[in-house]
Amino acid sequence: MHGNNLLRFVRRLLLKNQSLWSLGSNGVSALAGLLLFAFSSSRLSATDFGIWVLFQTVNTLMEMFRTGLLLPGYLQLSAGRTKKSKLHVFESVTFIFVLITVGQAAVCWSLHLAVAANSSWNFFFTNYPWVVLSGGVVTLTEWWFQSIVRFHVILVLRTANRLLMVVFIYFFAFDLSRLILVQVLVNTIMGVIILVFMRVPNIKRIKFDGVHGRILFNFGKYATPSQMLANLLRSSDTLMISYAMGAAATGIYGAAAKFLEFVELPIRSFGAVNFNQLAALANAGKHHDALTLARQKVWRLTLRVLPLAALLCIFAPQLIMLVSGQQYLSSIPVLRVMAIYCIFIPADRYCGLLLESFGRPDLNLIKVFVMLVSNVLGNAVAIWYFNTPVSIATSSIVTFSVGVGFGFWLVTRAIPQPAFPLSVSVNRP
């Protein structure tokens, strides 16, 4: 009897702290990425490291395409459903996922025949299919547990995956070929463990539903370019500084931008958990309740960001010296300006989450596009009149202000009715 009570207590404790588990899983990924970057940069030649950076960059873009096409639509469509009904939807997701993954692999294997054998692109086209095919089970499993809000399981999976990756690369990977081999090997090991020992029946059954497929496509055709533009928005400052001011100014800006991860990481983590709640309310027709919940989350997150922003302002000299060294002292005012506009990030993030939870990824695409145009124009003005990294950072304050204001206006416009028949075309148990 006492054992059952203990199990129930542990279960409630695990389910109650999903935001912290989400933060932990993202933190594990960030730390592992840092370690892998350090290992690869120290062991590879400059040429091989450049090839590896290209591989990782294009890999991220390919993954962004697949994720944007399927995951946001699946999370919105399945929110508020029973577990059995979620499995039915995910069977369609799995079917489309397999088609996209096999298609990406086939295209890459075909393209490797058309490029020079000793080129960086040949290395990518030859090896990417093995990485993407071996990692399919792990990716689908994480998607499933995200849809049922079990981020503590995702934390365990990511910790095991990243720990194996770090250990194998540290002891066995000393060239490009072994880096690829380790990734494929770890993905395969994790996939076998999941299929044998975990209850994830949606991966073992593939069944396509045409209604689900149409809804996912309607959602994904907007969510995918939204993610692409958001990625371009994050990198547009660096690209414009590099073109107009040179490598030194790019380094000054980049040294300060590293610290924004400490603000964005918890916001992304909490948003991943809250999206399910917002979408469930929207699918039940309670759009105003979802808006109220989002406002509460924004206020709480903003209040938590404020002291962090203050610490970044106060200790900017010490932080820059600690991480980047004395040669980057010019990054101090840049970091202080970034600390100001990071206060707007929670509101901007939740505007996007609300639009997608309401079934309006098309409006979120418009929001991201307007922010990108605003940022590019602001950067152009800053370069024309001041031509300093600090002025570029200052223009981002305007960009995020526009994102929050315009995003909130779009949210109010999206409340009356969703663009796609997410709750009328599919019967919800």
Image: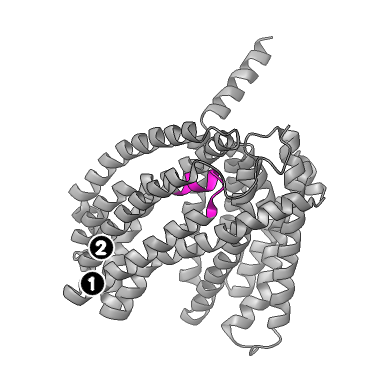
Whether residue 359 appears in magenta in the rendering, the answer is yes
Secondary element type, mark 1: helix
Identity of the amino acid at label 2? Ser
Q: Residue at x 73, y 81 (%)?
A: 110
Identity of the amino acid at label 1? Val
Question: In terms of depth relative to the viewer, which is nearer, 329 or 65?
Answer: 65
Q: Is residue 58 left or right of residue 422?
A: left
Mark 2 surroundings: few (<14), some (14-19) or many (≥20) residues within 10 A: many
Q: Quadrant of residue 198?
A: top right
Marks 2/1: CA–CA distance: 9 Å
In this picture, which residue range is highlighted in magenta?
Answer: 352-361
The residue identified by callout 1 is 381
Tell me if I can see residue 189 in this picture. Answer: no
Q: Is residue 116 left or right of residue 319?
A: right
Tell me if I can see residue 273 in this picture. Answer: yes
Secondary element type, mark 2: helix
Q: Is residue 369 left or right of residue 277?
A: left
Disc on the earlier residue, 2 or 1: 1
Question: In terms of depth relative to the viewer, which is nearer, 377 or 101?
Answer: 377
- Residue 29 in the image, given as x and y percentages of width and height: 52, 52
Above or below residue 272? Residue 222 is: below
Q: Residue at x 69, y 50 (%)?
A: 140
Above or below residue 106? Residue 19 is: above
Which quadrant of the rendered structure holds the N terminus? Answer: top right
Q: Is residue 363 left or right of residue 68?
A: left
Q: Quadrant of residue 239?
A: bottom left
Which quadrant of the rendered structure holds the C terminus? Answer: top right
- Residue 301 in the image, given as x and y percentages of width and height: 36, 38
The residue identified by callout 2 is 395
Mark 1 surroundings: few (<14), some (14-19) or many (≥20) residues within 10 A: some
Q: Residue at x 32, y 55 (%)?
A: 402
